[in-house]
Image (tube, rainbow, N blue to C red):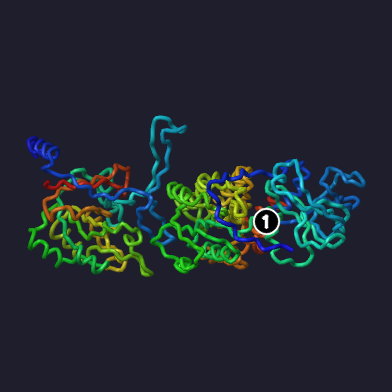
Amino acid sequence: MTAPLARPRRKNPVLRTPQPLLPPWARSRAALGLTAAAALGRFELQVCERCAAVQYPPREACHRCLCDALVWREQSGAGALLATTIVHHSHDLYFRERVPWRLGLVQLDAGPTVLAHLVAGCAPAPSRVWIGARLDKSGQGVLLAFPTEEVPNMADDRELREMSCDPKYRKVLVTDGKTRVGQATVRALIDAGADLVWVGYAEPWKKFPGFAELEALPQATLVPLDVTDSRSVKEVAAEIGGKVDILVNTAEMHRAHGIASRSGVDVARSEMDVNYFGLLRLAQEFGPVMRSRGADGPASATAWVNVLSIYALTNYPPQGTFSASKAAAFSLSQCLRAEMRAGGVRVINVFPGPLDDEWNQSVPPPKLSPEALAKSIVKALQDGVEDAYPGDVAQEWLARFRESPKTLERELSAAGG
Amino acid sequence: MTLNSLMSLAADLASGKVRVVDLSQTLSPEFPQIVLPPELGQCWPFRIEEISRYDERGPAWYWNNFSCGEHTGTHFDAPIHWVSGRDLPHNATDTLPVRDLIGSACVIDCSREASADPDFLLTVEHVKRWEAVHGRIPARAWVLMRTDWSKRSDPVAFQNYDETGQHTPGPAAEAVRFLIDERDVIGFGSEAIGTDAGQGYHLRPPYPCHTYMHGAGRYGLQCLANLDQLPPTGAVIVCAPLKIKNGSGSPIRALALVPG
């Protein structure tokens, strides 16, 4: 059974902070297919189109019939735990620091036998388990064996916590806590066990309903932060950057204009200044220090969450300039992900469909509530995924985009003009 | 004005017999700017981005790029800023007569009234009571409404919003008409975010100071500071906007020359 994670003690300041090390990162192009699925929280393996054999490890040609028509398909992960072992010695520097480490040999019902990280709570072999895919500290997909029954404190398992970005006992910065999304995110993080949530807010003389109540929460601390002001971002980072374990960028400027519907570039510039340049400012000031703290104890720096939009994938013409600003942020977030990798800090992108907010007043439902978005942010952190698409619209548009981006573009252009 | 007077002035400035008072707020990202309803276009706040600071981006120099609106910080309003002044000749910052930019100032102290009531309106009666003590407001003088509002260093208090909008002091519609028609002033200056009161939209006409002043080819100054250092009469102020082509105004370094 997993003992619940104890609240980490205060750090001893005379001790050197361990440098973040990463588990083996090298993967072939074929193997990256497993990573790509794990980034979405899915366990997929290749399946031969000719003979239906399930493949593991990932490869270029079917292990049974040598056909090269292999497609990635989601797997149930159901399997039998054949044997377990505990690794006490490793030549790999990352694992050397973390032994003893549990591993299990699992025969999937789908066919292949896999070696997986063994989450505490699995019944001793022989037993039933299910295999899931997670991203490890280097951001690559790995397999874990989970118990079939609900196990208390499973998320506190040392091996699992290493693969996730759990907010429990961590300190979080929510860059804009004034909006309904920001407020809901603050509350959801506190409910998920965050020790401290800094609540960023700009333009103090603009009062938003519900914001004053956040001050009453013992875990919340208000901090003036304007992502359009480089000096503001720099000052906040200087003050608290060394303590931020998770940064959730909720700062957003949202208007509903295409190109012709509003003359002048000032609205679009404002969208870019918050949605794109805001991210850049935050990344420059908070990125390096978070990256250096990727292995800083049980409450290490672990994740950077961007609240993007499904419109970042394909432009939604009625909100064309907003879409473009989110697309710019999306591209930049991929750059940030690459730069944060060395620190083992995960960059998580959340792509909601339209939110149930004032600027989407004329958008027909389904629309995502701020509370639902906040929940999906916390879940993405707990599951350690890289990309989350909460809500019906986001899920549908993602499926259509993956099938054919051009077709989705054409379907959405019916809404514009 | 003779050469002797000018040389005298220069000597007095050097010796301190004439003091220069800074009437401008510091331009910084924290200083609040005017905010309109979200559906409308907005004035940019002041923002500044470092280009280099004796570093790899520029080894021997420090400099910045900045951005702001024409109406950010302590600033000047030209007649073209308002619809009532749109068609007047010489109504933009680059075309208005520069002789208008240096002039005498009458400072009307409303600090007590504004402290008691943030929505305080300066009336004709107030102006006449001031004149009874300090003399008639001369033609082409600036009228500056001292409220000590500039001492509100907390942006929340400076903007002073509640659910019905901003609550800052300003002139009553009749007072503006009086100052133009009966006293021929060159312009009106305020310490608050606008020359009109925070609730000016609800006066008749809406925003009477902007409407009447700019409609008569006169000017406005806002976010002034240190008016409490000026004598009621006798100060000469300098308030020159940038020479922006077809500009509606600009941030200024407003200065006052006062007896030392």
The kind of residue on which mark 1 rests is Arg
Looking at the picture, how far across and down is residue B174, in whole percent?
19, 66
Q: What's the chain of the residue with tag 1?
A: A
Q: Is residue A407 left or right of residue A71?
A: left
Looking at the picture, how far across and down is residue A69, in whole percent?
85, 46
Q: Is residue A132 left or right of residue B194?
A: right
Q: Can you see residue A228?
A: no
- Residue drawn 16% across the image and 53% down it: B230
Q: Can you see residue A166?
A: yes
Q: Nearer the viewer, residue A344 or A184?
A: A344
- Residue drawn 83% across the image and 51% down it: A114
Looking at the picture, how far across and down is residue A354, in whole percent?
59, 62
Residue at the disc numbered 1? A161
- Image quadrant where residue B152 sits: bottom left
Q: Is residue A404 left or right of residue B70?
A: right
- Image quadrant where residue A207 sits: bottom left
Residue farthest to the top, as pictured: B60
Residue count near mark 1 (Cα–Cα under 10 Å), binned few <14, some 14–19, many ≥20: some
Residue farthest to the right, as pictured: A65
